[in-house]
Image: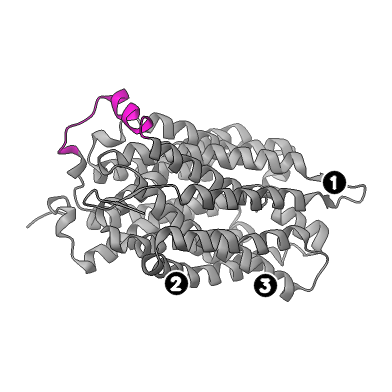
Amino acid sequence: MNTPADHSAAALSRSRERWLLLTIAGVQFTHILDFMIMMPLGPQFTRLFGITDAQFGLLVSAYTLSAGVSGLLAATYVDRFDRRSLLLWLYGLFALATLACGLAGSYAVLMAARVAAGVFGGVLSALAQTIVADVVPFERRGRAMGIVMSAFSVSTVAGVPMGLWLAGWLGWHATFFAIAGLCALFCLGAWLTLPALRHHLQEGRPAIWRGIGEVLVERNHWRAFALSAVMMFTGFTVIPFITIYMQTNVGLSDQDIPLLYLVGGAVTLLTARWFGRMTDRLGKVQTFSRLAAAVSLPLMATTLLPPAPLPLVLIVSTAFFALMSGRMIPGMAIITSAALPRLRGTFMVLNASVQSAAMGLASLVGGMIIARDAAGHVEHYWIAGLVGVIASFVSIGIARRLKLHSAAGVQRA
């Protein structure tokens, strides 16, 4: 009887492809939730560990910064191994790092655990997207990305509210224990569904620095990195400060915040599949251009929202979540297709580092733009939103200049 590793990617049936995509989505779900759950748990950490807001900000950014560094390091080895084995090892280590977060009894230990989680989680994201691009034919890649990237919606609609509920009932430790348990479950699923992915090794294993060099000499790759950076910049000038703005300026309570995630995530979960189909039907660049332009409306509305009834706030925030994550579906399909197939693994981990750096820079810029008045209200948030809108329209221009590659290596506009 053959083990999962005996099957080749080319021989995957549509049914097994579906299970593989769901497993990859589960992997994405756990490491996205691991990152997202930190922000709403901030009040508990600052109170229990006696830390300042600045120290908590460093705790949150530790994940992103370590993910960026690990991406650069991973670029030296990711295309030299079977992707299945690499994913299983990295995911197992990520699960242990998440377990360590739950066991942490001090700020220093939790910081070390967050750094470790970022090291493995940052590479996981790039590797998961690379596997999807390797396994799923070009013509169905938009829909496949829609399935995988729905993990963000599920983590928002189910993961964050459930994590907050667990933290309130059993303490914040329980939230990380639960995530580690889910990691173990999806690790088993990955072992069962992932085929051996060695096709990229058939052309020979590149020398460590030669592989990076081959990625960097391609002008099209640099355009893809630029697209990735401005896509992240669009959202993260605004996203880190939404909760603060909604509470101080709009007037929402602590109990209302989980509802924003719940409703926004639920709608995004439904629209992600639709945007995936639209990507395959209308074309990746065309769909991305429409969504990147459309997101400017809820982006500015979110940053200009005055005190308003909860239903109106939910309409604005849900449109923001749905379009902000929706543009990522054709966007990531474009970026993965812009890479030369034999260098895609190295390209994607470098791309993950670019994304992490752009997220950190955008958050820094947004934090420098906004201010507090004497009453504690957020000021100049709309300027941070305007910067995001400009970045979104820049991303449209970059996307239109990229050359995309099918599985057969044929370039497509």
Examine the structure image and report whether residue 207 is included in the region drawn in magenta: yes
Q: Farthest residue toward the bottom?
A: 311
- Amino acid marked by disc 1: Arg
In the foreground, 45 or 170:
45
Looking at the picture, the colour scheme in use is: one colour
- Residue at 30% x, 45% y is 88
Q: Which residue is mark 3?
A: 315
- Residue at 71% x, 56% y is 243
- Amino acid marked by disc 2: Trp
Badge 3 crowding class, 10 Å Cα cut-off, few under 14, some 14 to 19, many 20 or more, is: some
Q: Is residue 162 something that shows in the picture?
A: no
Query: In the rendered structure, which segment of residues is drawn in magenta?
Result: 201-218
Which quadrant of the view contains residue 350? top left
Examine the structure image and report whether residue 320 is included in the region drawn in magenta: no
- Distance between the alpha carbons at the discs numbered 2 and 3: 19 Å
- Distance between the alpha carbons at the discs numbered 1 and 3: 26 Å
2 or 3: tag closer to the N-terminus: 2
Which quadrant of the view contains residue 10? bottom left
1 or 2: tag closer to the N-terminus: 2
Secondary element at image label 1: strand
